[in-house]
Image (tube, rainbow, N blue to C red):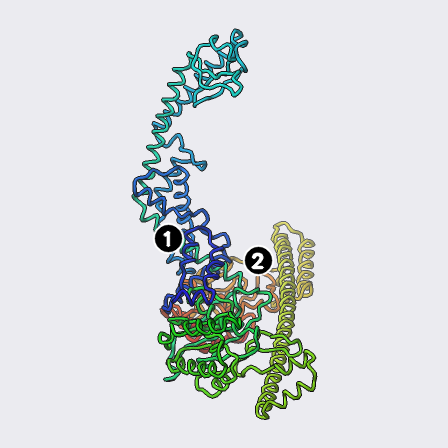
Amino acid sequence: MNDKHLSTLEYPKILQLLSTHTSFSAGREKVLALRPTSDFGEIQSRLATTSEARVLLRERPGTSVGGAHDVRPLTADARRGKILAAGDLLDVRDTLAAGRRLQRTLSRLEDTFPHLGQVADAIRPCGEIIEEINRCIDDQAAVRDQASPSLSRLRREVGIAHDRIQAKLQNIISAARNAPYLQEALITRRENRYVIPLKAQFRDKIRGVVHDRSSSGVTLFIEPLSVVELNNAWRMLQLEEEEEVRRILAALSLQIGQNALAIEETVDALGQLDATFAKAKYAEVIDAAEPELVTFSGRTDAHPGSTVRLLGARHPLLDPEGVVPIDVELDEETFMLVITGPNTGGKTVSLKTVGLLTLMAQAGLHIPVEAGSALSPFDDVYADIGDEQSIEQSLSTFSSHITNIISFLDKADERSLVLLDELGAGTDPAEGSALARALLEHFRRRRSTTFVATHYPELKTYAQLTPGARNGSVEFDAESLSPTYRLSIGLPGRSNALTIARRLNMPQRIVEEARDMVSAEDRRTQDMLDDIHRLRIEMAQAREEADAARAEAKRILRGLQDRLAAIEDERQQILEEARREAAELLDSVRREVRQLRSRLRAAAAPVDAVRTVTEELKTLESEMPTARPLETPEQATEDEWSGIVERRAIQPGDRVWVRPLKSEGEVLKVAEGEAEVQVGRARTQVALAALELRQGEGPEQVPEGPSVSTETPPSPGRSIDLRGGRVEESLRELDRYLDQAMRSGLPEARIIHGKGTGTLRLAVRDFLANHPLVREFEAADYREGGDGVTVAVIVER
């Protein structure tokens, strides 16, 4: 797209704002180079990447390219053989480390953020370079002693030589005989050699090399001859150390030069991610949304098939607190919109908003609109929008506009968006109006999607009578004498000159004379427009009131739902507490029963003791049903209690009576308080407490003790989800669920097994076909899961 038209629509200003959200120069470079594209797939990918970045930064706000630098100039130097400084090497390390960190994060989340993961795949972190730089250089950009054995040895020797110099000089300045000659008893350095301050008049008292003197000339800084060789040795070791450091930096620089391409690719990928994160941050700042991208469709021979639907659109460069959102939506018959209205009413802003948001969307930016907005990708966007309104410059203004329009007159086609502000202005109104209509007809024949702002009433008529064209207007508040900046599509703008004149206290007589000069037909048209605008305002107010009432109803409904949920939670807590208390009571009663039974079994128990225990058991038996809202299905008589003997535990192979099914079965397996029982052709898991050993016909007549259960067991819920488990485990879980569902009185159950390969579905339905608790079953309605869900009708309790 032409940079001139991008500048006209202020697209570069958006890029400048966007660049402030980048973290380093490579990201800023990417942002400033961002251009709209017309490739449908590329736009979709850009928008999706921005959406992923927004979600990522919300969920992981610390995600960034922090620590990255644009080290491409450094890699270029290293490729040419230049030795990089230690600080530059740390910049390379930090950049590679940032890339490695970001790549690891996005690779773990690639299923959730595939587009970001694809960008991160281009990162080549060069872990061996990171480790080698860390080994050789510390965070203060100093080469470590352990960078090489030679450097470690040299630094030890440098330290020893330094200590020797210090010890020798300390002896000299500490000697009492030298005290009168010294200006001060201290050791200092001049020209990188250690010296002592000597009074100038005693220069012959301590022999040595003079390296400097004070500004007053009274102090000489001499290097005593006794330490000259020590200083020389120390300096030689320093030079060897510097050479070894240089060799280490050269080796690291060579490694970077050899991997320059990989490092540059990493910087490029980090720049791309930084630019994407900047898009996400900017979208949050302007409260933007991802627009729907719609392909061009061949609706009619005359219509280009473009879609422009911007709901609640706001110009991103205007103050968000003061900007008035506009709705711009072209129906299926319209591809040209003629906007009329007063000066400073928002016509130009409306044009710029449409053009700029189109460019932003095609660059992959989210735009400040409401959800449901949609755009088609245009190959080109042409804009002729100018602000010069000086009478003295009218000719030059007209000429510049016409020259600009001529530049794209034959380039605009059915995949172009054309924006024209004050078309034909700046010249004779009659000729300007005629020229404007001719230009509009030219763009209509070329099927270009066109938006025009104008003051010419003839263009209102053109838009009203021409297929594909439609009128629009920016509204004006006659009471406050100010524009509302709202765009209304479907009606032309009204003339407010007489109304404004009267509001500004123009004499009524003059206003009436002017009104009489307007033709009767124009007055009727104006009155009709006034009535239509008034009705539309009333409708808008009614719609706003309805929306407010609907929002209030939703708020009240949410409040009621929250209250109901709280009540239900409280009810569940009360039930759980009741069940817990009942269970504790049962445990207490059973413990007492066991204690009493033990006393009965005592071999030496006297008759009186037996009678006493029997009476206590009768008392317990009579109290148990009334102690809590529980029931005792079987009541044992005094004779039965007194004749109780310890019954053995149920074992595999036993014939038992299954109380919930009122059927007899055989125990197959016993584990953890439950037994697997074969009842007919079906197998079921049953609690041991619900089984009775069979002795002869019917259930056993001498129970172990009173069996106590709550009146209504808790419901397991109307559905069970078996997806993700193995078939055998899923069937065991289903069997337990059906048992609990039957006991709680559920009429039917929804069994969610998914579609998948069909293995679990077939196993579940075969199992249900032979299950004694299932009367019938069928696949769920397609709206409730279809073949992925089976609905089973459960037998009555």
Q: Secondary structure at mark 2?
A: loop
Q: Nearer the viewer, residue 62 or 181?
A: 181
Determine which residue is flagged by label 1: 268
Say which quadrant the C terminus sits in. Answer: bottom right
Instruction: Tell me whether circle 2 and circle 1 mark residues in contact (CB < 8 Å).
Output: no
Determine which residue is flagged by label 2: 645
Q: Quadrant of residue 523?
A: bottom right
Say which quadrant the N terminus sits in. Answer: bottom left
Q: Which mark is residue 19?
A: none
In this rendering, is residue 431 above or below 601? below
Q: Nearer the viewer, residue 370 or 394?
A: 394
- Residue 497, position as x, y percentages in the image: 61, 81
- Residue 466, position as x, y percentages in the image: 45, 87
Residue lying furthest bottom in this view? 520
Q: Nearer the viewer, residue 677 or 595?
A: 677
What's under tag 2, amino acid-wise?
Val
Which residue is rendered at x = 51% and y = 70% of the image?
A: 388
In this rendering, is residue 788 above or below 218? below
Binning the other alpha carbons within 10 Å of mark 2 as few (below 14), some (14 to 19) or many (20 upward) gives some
Q: Nearer the viewer, residue 88 or 637?
A: 88
- Residue 93, position as x, y percentages in the image: 39, 43
Binning the other alpha carbons within 10 Å of mark 1 as few (below 14), some (14 to 19) or many (20 upward) gives many
